Image (spheres, grey):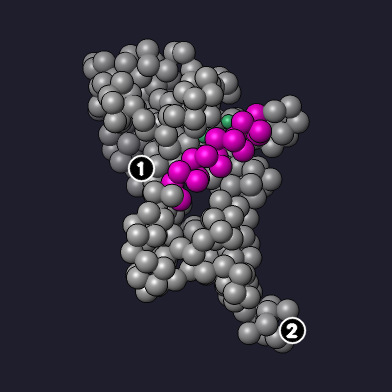
Amino acid sequence: MNIWTDPHAWQWLGKAFAANFVREGLYYLVAALLLWLVVHQWLHKRLAHRVIAGWPTSADVRREMAYSFSTLFIFSAQGLVVFASILRGDMVIYFKPGQYGYLWLALSLPAMLLWHDFYFYWTHRLLHSGWLFRRVHGVHHRSRNPSPWAAYAFHPIEALVNSLVTPLALMVAPLHGLVLLAFTIHQIVRNAHGHLSIETMPRGFARHWLGGRFTTTTHHHLHHETAQGNYGLWFTWWDRWMGTERGDYHARFEKVTAGR
Ligand SMILES: [Zn+2]
Ligand SMILES: [Zn+2]
């Protein structure tokens, strides 16, 4: 089907957009709702000693939901571009596991995580410069004590930048449908988790030879608190290599995980 000449193109686009919106919305809703219910509601009192600085206010939660809702529109529209590119043969999402070799099947998820981590770190640093911070990324930083609902709380321009991660990857290499699903679930769960305002990892995790390579909620919380340093997404190495890891990260992590 040629989406530009087919008389039913707009109807088709509308349905595809709605399907994208429901799918993206469900991922966000389920991840944020579950973490919010379990950590911020049911375990609210038991985890009080794990609060990094303070609880988010209801105004924070409402604003985070509103911006996340607008981000879902951007992500859904971006999904249409991917659909159209697949129809044109410019991008490939495949479903036969061995179609591009089992080696690529096994490597593609780690490759996507490394690519996303790299892309986010550098675009995030750019978003912290002058006008971009004041007018665009500042929206995300209005939450000093974020909630899981902040996972997609972006200005539309930032949402557009973030939405390019998967299409840029698909421009270079084919991806299996299940790899994309795992990538999406990982990103929304860890993204919502990173905005908990409560540290859930065990004592010693940030200094562990393996654990210390992963960002924690405290890591990203300090970024929200100060808007300086700790720009990384999934791994701590870009901040370490670039000298942008906050000097107080380990002390704050140890303080919040020290126990009652
Ligand atoms: Zn954040
Ligand atoms: Zn930031």
Q: Give residue 5's mark.
A: 2
Residue at (49, 25) in percent of width and height: 241
Residue 66 at least partly seen: no
Q: Residues within 10 Å of mark 2 (few under 14, many from 20)?
A: few
**Count of residue discs:** 2
Q: Position of residue 236 (x, y in %)?
A: 43, 29
The answer to whether any part of residue 84 appears in the image is yes
Q: Position of residue 53 (x, y in %)?
A: 43, 20
In the displayed structure image, the side of residue 213 where residue 130 appears, left or right: right
Label 1 beta carbon less than 8 Å to ligand 1: no
Which of the 4 image quarters holds residue 17? bottom right
Q: Which residue is mark 1?
A: 35
Location of residue 60 (image quadrant) = top right
Say what amino acid the circle numbered 1 marks: Leu
Q: Is residue 163 above or below residue 97?
A: above
Picture layout, residue 164 above or below residue 35: below
**Is 110 included in the stretch rendered in magenta?**
no
Give the residue displayed 26% in from the left and 21% down from the top: 204
Which residues are the magenta region? 112-128
User: Mark 2 vs mark 1: which is more N-terminal?
Assistant: 2
Residue plotted at (47% across, 36% down): 233
- Looking at the rendered image, the disc whose residue lies closer to the viewer, 2 or 1, is 2
Residue 81 drawn above or below residue 226: below
What amino acid is found at the position of numbered circle 2 in the picture? Thr
Q: Does residue 125 show up magenta in the picture?
A: yes
x 53%, y 29%: residue: 231
Give SS at disc 1: helix
Q: Position of residue 214 (x, y in %)?
A: 37, 33
* The C terminus, quarter of image: top left
Q: 10 Å neighbourhood of mark 1: few (<14), some, or many (≥20)? A: some
Which sits in the foreground, 58 or 174? Answer: 174
Label 2 sits on a secondary structure element that is loop
